[in-house]
Amino acid sequence: MPSEPAPALARNAIDFVDARHVHQALAALDAYGGEATVLAGGTDVVVQLLQGLIRPRALVHIRRLPELAGVASGERTEIGALTTHWELGTHPAIRAEHAALAQAARTVGGRQTQNVGTIAGNVVNASPAADLLPALLVAGAQVAMRSSAGTRSLALERFLVDRKRTALEPNELVTALSLERPGPRTAETYLKVGRRGAMEVALVGLAARLQLDDAGRLGDVRIAVCSVGPTAFRAHQAEAALTGSRGEEEAVAEAAQLLQAAARPIDDVRGTAAYRRRVLAGLLARAVSACVRSAMSEGGRGRCS
Amino acid sequence: MQLRLTVNGRAHELDVPAQATLLDVLRDELGLTGTKQGCNEGECGACTVLVDGKAVDSCVLMALAAAGSEIVTVEGLAAPDGTLSPLQRAFVEAGGVQCGFCTPGFLMTLTAALRETPAPSEDEIRAAIAGNICRCTGYTQIVEAVQAAARMEARG
C-alpha cells in the first residue's frame, strides 16, 4: 500500500552528511553522539526510516568512501564494507574461494537490491535471517572496525550479540570483512529454503565449509545457520560430531540432532518452528554429502551444489 | 538541502529534505510520474530507475545519496520524437502490458539487463526480473517481449 512519510519524520528535519573521507564520517558519528545512522546502500535503513522504526538526527552517507571498497586476496580475503551483493556474487576470487558467500549473496532480493545492498549493511543490520552471515561465519570472518579513537577487529561470532544487536559502538564504522581462505580438499556451500525461488527471506539458511584430512576424514568442520534463532550462529557441537567421520549417515544424524538442539526457531508468518527444525536436518545432510563429494573429487576449493 | 543530479539527460538543482527518497523527487518535484510507487520497501520493483546505468529501487534510495548521478526513468527510454525503444515496442506487441502499473519498472530493469546480456536465455530473463512483480501477465508475455526485443536489436 502506498504510504506517506511518517508524520514524525516530516516534522523533524534530519541532517545528511555526505562523507567524502572516512575521518569525516567518523567525526560526524562523534558529533551526533549515537543519534546518527550510517547510510550505505540503504535497502534496510531507508525502509526503517520510512516506517518510523528509527529516528536518527542525521544520516551519515558513506557510499562514496573509496577506502571501504574493493576485494583483495592476500593471506586472508579482505572484502571492503561497501562491496555489494552483486559484486559478491560475481567477483571471480569470491566465487572461486568463498562459494557459500557468493551463493548466499545471489539469493538476497532481486537485482535492484543486490546492486546497492552492501556486505557490511547485511552484517550490521544483523537480521536473524541475514543470508550472508552463515557463509561469513564458516569462513571465520573477522569484522574490521574504525572509530576516531582507532581500529579494532572482532570475530563475527562475537560481533553478533542478539537479534539485530551487534558489538558495534555508535561511533564506529565497519570498514571490512576479513575471511580465511580455504585450504586444500575444502569445499563449502550455502543452502536456503524459502517459499519461492526469488525475493525470499530465508525460512532456514545453512552454510557448511568442510575440509578433508589426508585419510579422507572430516578435519575442519564448520556449520552455521540463520533464521533458526535470534541471530545466525556456528553450530559447534554439530561440528564436533562430524569431525573425524567420513560424513556417514550416523554421524550426520547425530550432528543434526545437536544442530536442532542448538537452534531456537520461532513460529512466524513464513513458517513454524517445528518445520524449521525438520528442514535443518535435511539441509545439513545435503550440505555434508555435497561438500564431501566435492572436496574429494576436486581436491578442494570447489563449490558443492 | 541542495541536490544536483541529471535526469533523462537534463541537469537539475533542487532543494530537498534529507529524508526524501529519489522516488519522491522524481514524482513530486520533477513531475515524472511514470515511475510508480508500489510497496515502498524495495520488494516489488515498480519504482525501478537507472542510476549511473544500474537498476535500483528508487523508493529505498535517499535522493541525496544519488547526488551527482545520471538518472534514467521510463520517460527517458523513447526517442525525443516519441519513437519507442525496441523493448517498449516489443512489450506492446507481445502483450507484456495489462494494467501497466509494473511496466515502467520492468522496462528499466530489462533495459539494464539487455545492455549487460544482449541475447539472454529464458532463465537469464527470469533471473533478471526476480525483483519485479507483475500481477497480471503471469510473466510469460514479458519474457516473450524481451526475446523479441533482443531479436530486434540483433537485426539492428
Image (spheres, rainbow, N blue to C red):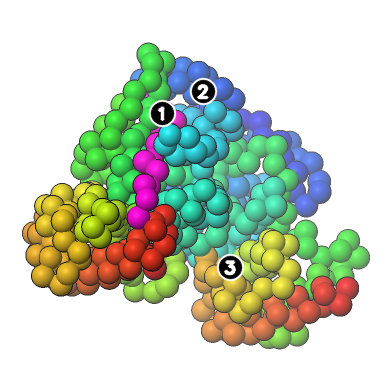
Residue B128 on the magenta span: no
Residue at mark 2 to residue at mark 3: CA–CA distance: 34 Å
- Is disc 1 surrounded by few (<14), some (14 to 19) or many (20+) residues within 10 Å? many
In the shown orientation, is residue A170 left or right of residue A80? left
Q: Which amino acid does label 3 sit on?
A: Ala
**Mark 2–mark 3 contact, CB under 8 Å?**
no
| Viewer-closest of A267 and A221 | A221
Q: Where is residue A186 in the image (x, y as percent from the top left)?
A: 34, 54
Q: Which amino acid does label 2 sit on?
A: Val
Q: Are marks 1 and 2 in one subunit? A: yes
Q: Residue A22 carries which label?
A: 2
Residue at mark 3 to residue at mark 1: CA–CA distance: 32 Å
Residue at x 21%, y 42% (from the top left corner): A162
- Is disc 2 surrounded by few (<14), some (14 to 19) or many (20+) residues within 10 Å? many
Q: Which mark is residue B130?
A: none
Residue A179 on the magenta span: yes
Q: What SS does tag 3 mark?
A: helix
Q: Residue B128 carries which label?
A: 3
Residue at x 48%, y 30% (from the top left corner): A60
Rendered position, B91 above or below B38:
below
Q: What SS does tag 2 mark?
A: helix
Magenta stretch bounds: A171-185
Q: What SS does tag 1 mark?
A: strand
Q: Which amino acid does label 1 sit on?
A: Leu
Residue at x 49%, y 38% (from the top left corner): A73
**Mark 1–mark 2 contact, CB under 8 Å?**
yes
Q: Mark 3 lies on which chain?
A: B
Residue B1 shows in the view: yes
Q: Residue furthest right?
A: B81
Q: Where is residue B141 in the image (x, y as percent from the top left)?
A: 63, 85
